[in-house]
Amino acid sequence: MDAHVADAAFVVGTLRTTASHTIGIPHLAALLRDVPAGADAAEYRRAVVEDNILGRPTQTGRQRTFRHLRELYLLDPGRPEFAALRHFWNIDPSSRPLLAGLLAFTRDEVLRVSFAAISDLPAGSSVTSADLTEAVAGQLGHEMSESTLSKIGRNTGACWTQTGHLAGRTKKVRTEVEARPVAIAYAAYLGHLAGGRGLGVLDNPWSHILGLAHGHSLEALRAAHTQGLLDLLVAGDVVDVSFRAFGGDA
């Protein structure tokens, strides 16, 4: 999936935050717990940098943490990707790791490329840092130093552990994630922003993060529709998906 602009406000990112840092889901969860849903972008910065709600010991550390979170999650209600994340965040807390992972995957190309190392593995398969590094090096290695590549396996392994795709500390194994309707709706919305229509909102790389089996997109969309998370109309071979339920689509 190459970087492109599919909507005036939507970009599949080429950031490489995870080359030096994890996706920080615990920090994101703490931030969204303390900053009210109606907050503007400046309030997120104030909470991390000035109020130090994440407990970073230095001013430099606070600024660095905020920069990483903003790179991965935008932290701006004016961006539809983040506005939708914020909308879905409190509906089903068990889906939060997948919601965060979906947006980080959208924003960070190192994380996207690393997923190739685990995407087709059955549950219980062993995954090493070297496996993840090899996947990234195969696509981006010519653009990265050896010292950077040496960190990537460890960082991306920690990222996929945070999302629930891996388990274990030193010895990691592949685990199955549960794609509940909230995560399905958010993945579909990201697919919609990227230009997908009909079943195309899920027949894309985001569905791989959810572990959806091929041919199950309509079933997944119906589950999300049943809970009022998206609008679905099926008429013969025509499938229409929209997001009026949370103002994400006119």
Image (cartoon, rainbow, N blue to C red):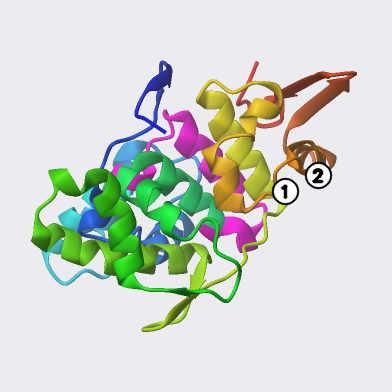
Q: Nearer the viewer, residue 79 or 152?
A: 152
Q: Amino acid at mark 2?
A: Ala
Number of residues whose C-alpha sits closer than 10 Å to that of mark 2, classed few (under 14), some (14–19) or many (20 or more): some
Q: Secondary structure at mark 1?
A: helix
Q: Which residue corresponds to the image point at 52% horizontal and 56% vertical from the top-left?
A: 119
| Residue 48 in sight from this viewpoint | yes
Q: Is residue 231 magenta?
A: no
Q: What residue is disc 1 on?
A: 181
The disc label shown at residue 115, or none = none
Residues in magenta, as a range:
70-97
Q: In the rendering, at what x and y percent does residue 243 appear?
A: 67, 27
- Left or right of residue 133: residue 32: right
| Cβ atoms at labels 1 and 2 below 8 Å apart | yes
Secondary structure found at label 2: helix
**Residue sitting at x 15%, y 45%:** 142
Which quarter of the figure has residue 55? bottom left
Work out whether 37 lies above or below 151.
Answer: above
Residue 223's disc is 2
Where's the C terminus, which quadrant?
Answer: top right
Who is closer to the viewer here, 174 or 85? 174
